[in-house]
Image (spheres, rainbow, N blue to C red):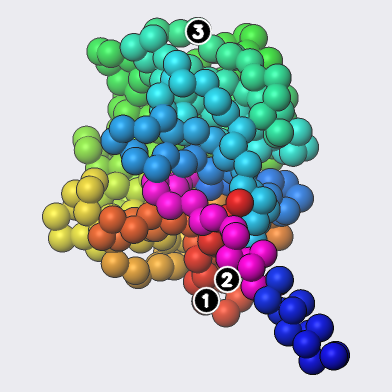
């Protein structure tokens, strides 16, 4: 009787597991909540046809939940948790351009923060959560970095060198780290500067595209993805993850997988990274353990 009961329990547990559905399609742009318990990401079953929505899940991939539901904006990207974990900012295409939005971390109380010409994209919170830095991409002209209050008020320009200036992130030392080609056209390196534009420092000097700089939680390292090892230096070619010290020294390659490893973010404890991987049509989220070098796919199920 005991053996029969145990068998039935195993069968029930197996059926419960098999009932879970895995999310399959275009999955990317992950970001980990400040407490390390959840992730936000974008998803579309067919990226060329379907509406891209923003989802959340437990960090182990369980309990997938759709957060955005507005089809008027077909593409949403770049979800980032506020430092207190209560809000998620992102950008969405709208009316021949793109604007910055914010919502509660459960998807409620959606609010549009910007109403500017062109594409206004890549929001990122200041460390205290009071401000948001972002990019504006005009129809004609160069990509610029802007900053605004967290409620969308007081929009103003940051200092912008004479180039295409991408992906601003504000540090706890009130500096901005960003990517730009102002030193060499079409060659994107990582720079930092004070908020007023003074003391610009070039942190990388690498042929290719070096994008999405992300400071480690303790401020000592910068993570980014680069195609420096791709012979063609194509923006659709091979990308790997790299790391440097905050002063630009100590370049270190983190991944060497086939395809593209992109949009890596730090776990709040600084011991792991989450990133998206594209290879031969496969797209998914992976976790890299910096302690032992292992890489594990995050299976997203609901």
* Residue 24 is a magenta residue: yes
Q: Are marks 2 and 3 in contact (CB under 8 Å)?
A: no
Q: Position of residue 273 (x, y in %)?
A: 56, 60
| Residue 41 makes an appearance in the image | yes
- Residue wearing tag 1: 294
Which is nearer the eye, 272 or 39? 39
Q: Earlier in the sequence, mark 3 or mark 1?
A: 3
At x 71% / y 60%, what residue is drawn? 269
Q: CA distance from mark 3 to mark 1?
A: 43 Å
At x 65% / y 56%, what residue is drawn? 62
Side (left or right) of 241 relative to 299: left
- The span picked out in magenta is 13-29
- Residue wearing tag 3: 115
Q: Earlier in the sequence, mark 2 or mark 3?
A: 3
Q: Are marks 2 and 1 in contact (CB under 8 Å)?
A: yes
Q: Position of residue 105 (x, y in %)?
A: 70, 34
Give the SS element for disc 1.
loop
Q: CA distance from mark 2 to mark 1?
A: 5 Å
Which residue, as the protein is rendered here, is positioned at the far right? Answer: 2
- Residue wearing tag 2: 289
Considering the image in quadrants, where does the N terminus appear?
Answer: bottom right
Q: Earlier in the sequence, mark 2 or mark 1?
A: 2
* Residue 275 is a magenta residue: no
Q: Is residue 115 above or below residue 292?
A: above
Corner quadrant of residue 246: bottom right
Which is nearer the eye, 23 or 1? 1
Corner quadrant of residue 202: top left
Which is nearer the eye, 150 or 210? 150
Give the SS element for disc 2.
strand
């Amino acid at each position: 009787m005991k053996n029969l009961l145990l068998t039935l329990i195993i069968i029930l547990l197996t059926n419960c597991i098999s009932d879970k559905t895995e999310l399959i399609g275009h999955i990317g742009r992950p970001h980990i909540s400040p407490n390390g318990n959840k992730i936000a990401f974008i998803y579309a079953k067919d990226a060329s046809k379907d509406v891209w929505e923003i989802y959340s899940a437990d960090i182990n991939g369980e309990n997938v939940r759709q957060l955005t539901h507005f089809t008027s904006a077909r593409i949403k990207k770049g979800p980032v948790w506020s430092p207190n974990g209560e809000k998620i900012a992102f950008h969405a295409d709208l009316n021949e351009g793109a604007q910055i939005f914010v919502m509660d971390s459960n998807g409620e109380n959606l609010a549009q923060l910007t109403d500017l010409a062109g594409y206004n994209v890549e929001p990122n919170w200041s460390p205290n959560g009071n401000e948001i830095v972002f990019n504006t991409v005009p129809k004609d002209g160069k990509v610029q970095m802007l900053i605004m209050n967290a409620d969308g008020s007081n929009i103003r320009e940051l200092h912008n060198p004479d180039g295409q200036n991408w992906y601003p992130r504000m540090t706890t030392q009130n500096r901005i780290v960003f990517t730009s080609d102002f030193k060499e056209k079409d060659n994107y390196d990582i720079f930092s500067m004070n908020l007023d534009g003074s003391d610009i420092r070039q942190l990388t000097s690498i042929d290719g595209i070096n994008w999405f700089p992300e400071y480690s939680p303790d401020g000592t390292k910068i993570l980014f993805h680069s195609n420096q090892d791709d012979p063609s230096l194509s923006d659709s070619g091979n990308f790997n993850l790299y790391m440097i010290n905050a002063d630009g020294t100590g370049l270190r390659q983190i991944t060497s997988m086939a395809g593209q490893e992109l949009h890596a973010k730090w776990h709040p404890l600084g011991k792991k990274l989450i990133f998206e991987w594209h290879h031969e049509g496969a797209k998914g989220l992976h976790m890299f353990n910096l302690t032992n070098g292992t890489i594990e796919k995050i299976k997203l199920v609901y």
